[in-house]
Amino acid sequence: MIHSLFRGLVLSCLLAGAALAQTDDHGDDHDHIEDCPPFEWGGYIDPGQQTYEQEVVAGFDDGRIVLEVRFDALAGPVAKHFMFLELIDGCVLRAVSVGSYMKEVVKLGKDVVHVDLYEPDTQRRLATLDSLPEIDTIRQQALAIFLGTEPKPEPEAKGGAIGN
């Protein structure tokens, strides 16, 4: 689960580490974040050792926003190339992450790229690829998922809406 990450649209910190609850410990001015639904996948979307740049790329009438995060050099066990976070009122609702897991790089001797959808209590593999997909393609797919216009991926380990 995740500590509070967001203060409005200008964010000082992406993810404050893999935490046990999606809660805010920054004082009374963010009490609403304690109302965030639990998000079990914080450790997988946490930037860990990686540095990153972020930008809000979409906003919806219901108050949701989509944050695009572009990571620098791969580092750590669940390294990411880029990620799209769907947020409302500072709460993570869903994430689409494009990353490489170091244990698989070592095991296979090559970089394998994973495109994963993280929802509060579900993780689904959307694709497993031999090369990094274009960020524009993943952005379009993530926005379609967040808008509900993309069919839900099947609950299988490989395959799905992106990259097949």
Image (tube, rainbow, N blue to C red):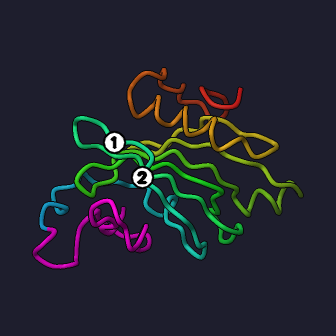
Q: Secondary structure at mark 1?
A: strand
* Residue displayed at 83% across by 58% down: 107
In the rendered view, does 144 fall on the left or right side of 121? right
Q: Secondary structure at mark 2?
A: strand
The boundaries of the magenta stretch are 1-30
* Residue displayed at 55% across by 33% down: 140
Which secondary structure is most common in the magenta stretch?
loop
Q: Is residue 125 above or below residue 38?
A: above
Comparing 51 with 102, the one in front is 51
Comparing 40 with 65, the one in front is 65
Q: Is residue 116 above or below residue 51?
A: above
In the rendered view, does 122 fall on the left or right side of 29? right
In the rendered view, does 73 fall on the left or right side of 98? right
Residue 127 location, quadrant: top right
Q: Picture coordinates of residue 104 (x, y %)? A: 76, 56
Q: Picture coordinates of residue 124 (x, y %)? A: 53, 38
* Residue displayed at 10% across by 75% down: 28
Residue type at mark 2? Val
Asked if residue 114 lies in the magenta stretch, the reply is no
Residue designated by label 1: 59
Neighbour tally class for label 1: few under 14, some 14-19, many 20 plus, Cα within 10 Å:
some
- Give the number of marks: 2
- Quadrant location of the N terminus in the rendered image: bottom left
Residue designated by label 2: 56
